[in-house]
Every structure is written in structure tokens, then in C-alpha cells.
Image (cartoon, rainbow, N blue to C red):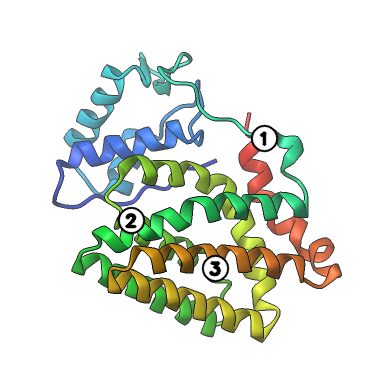
Amino acid sequence: MPQHFTPVSSGARLSDQVAEQLTAEIKQGRLMPGDKLPTEARLVAQFEVSRTVVREAVSRLKSLGLVDSRQGSGVFVSQKLPFAPLQFELQHAASQEAVVQMVEVRRALEAEVAALAAERRSASDICAIQHAVQALDAAVQAGGDGVAEDVKFHRAIADATRNPFLIQTLDYLGQFLHGATQVTRANEARRVDFATEVQSEHQAILRAVEAGDPSAARQAAAAHMGNAIVRIQQADPTFWHQEGERLAMPLIKGLSKP
């Protein structure tokens, strides 16, 4: 599967930012042992940095034992990684029940994420979350599914926690949760009352984080995920068979990548 990286910017050292994104791809299983890294030219173009920055980042990954160079062939993810990537069993992935269970995982995490965000958020964090909510509403009004915007909304809240381990955990789970998010968004778009509920729930989370109220933020985020489960369970019986299985395929593909 082709990798898509986010251009890096000023702030932390550029090569460190590139190395962190590449490391995340490996730790989250999107780049597996033996996989070849994108070419230097492609990394330069995607990260919008110089060749020197890319080379420094790759050198850092080599020092960590994450990648190896092969003369004339390129750079490859090491066959023996210094950590054991988390794996989920495919047999548990391909069902409506699995979508509910994935949302249960999100509920456990997102509630605490929102509480920490309320404690630690800065003015720039609030602006980012507000912008994400506006982008999500605009996407829905334009007839889109809002999946990418929904993910960015929750990521903006996670960024406000200032907890890199929590953020990296959510990033890893993202490859499995994306399919579940597609299902919940598609289901919610089928009914006006569902869509209105979701919008109201997002606003409740935003208000609690803005107010710096961890308890309210935790409650709002947990309620949002709990209600998402109820909405899945209340879906038209034909929805899962007509759309649910197809939309959940990213979840299954993420689990079954060789």
C-alpha cells in the first residue's frame, strides 16, 4: 500500500519529524519487515524537505535498527525489528459486532483523551479543534461522508493531550478504526436525526475542552462513542449487508496485510 506522508514544517528539527513519521509507519504495521521504503526522491517530494534532511532521517532509523540499506536496491524495513508490533486476529474483524467492539475500544481511549485535552489545551489547540469541527460540518453539508474530517477532529483533541505515547497508540489503532469510522459515518448519514445527534455530541466535547472541564469532557466523549454504538445497533437491518461490509474492508485489509 503506498505511503502518504505529511509535509514537515519549522519547529522541531526537520529530520527528526521525518524520522518520527517513518518510524510510526513501521510501528503501526503499514511498513512491514522486508518492505522497501519509498525512494529518496519520493520522500523529498512528500515531506517537502531537502535530500539532506531525508538522509539524516534514514540514518537515524538505521541507528535504531529499524531499516537496512541494500547496495543498489534501496532501504528496507529490518527483518528483525527491535519491538514486536501489535497484531489483531483477522477472524474477529469481519462482522457488524466487530465494528461495535472497535467503537468500544475508542470509547475507552477517547474519554480519557478528551479529559486530558481539557486539562492541557492551549489557545492554538482550541483553534485547531474548532477548525476541525467546522471542516467536518462543511464536508457533511457538501454531501461528503466526513470520515477524514472526523478523524482529524479526534486527532486535534489527542494532540492537545501532549502525550506522545497516547497519540502514537491512537495512530496505530487508526489503521483498524478507519473502517469502523466509515461504517458509523455512513450509517449516521442515512438519518437526519443521527446526523444532528453527532453534530451536537461533537459540540459538547468541544465546549468541555474549551471550558477546561476534564470531567465534562470525559463524559461528553464517552457519551459520543456510546451513542455511536447505539446508532449502529439501531441501523436499518439492510444497511450492514448493503454497505457495512464493503465500508469495513479497510479494517479487514489492515488486519490481513502480509
The C terminus - image quarter: top right
Residue 116's label in the rendered image is 2
Mark sitting earlier along the chain (1/3): 3
For the residue pair 37 and 207, the one nearer the viewer reads as 207
Q: x, y (%) of residue 241?
A: 84, 61
Q: Amino acid at mark 1?
A: Ser
Disc 2, disc 3: CB below 8 Å?
no
**CA gap, disc 1 and disc 3:** 29 Å
Task: Quadrant for residue 230, please give it.
Answer: bottom right
For the residue pair 29 and 228, the one nearer the viewer reads as 228
Q: How many marks?
A: 3
**CA gap, disc 2 and disc 3:** 17 Å
Give the vertical position of 207 relative to 258 (above or below).
Answer: below
Which residue, given by chain and number where applicable, does mark 1 sit on?
Answer: 256
Q: x, y (%) of residue 7?
A: 28, 51
Q: x, y (%) of residue 193?
A: 65, 85
For the residue pair 48 and 9, the one nearer the viewer reads as 9
Q: Amino acid at mark 2?
A: Leu
| Residue at x 66% of width, y 70% of height | 186
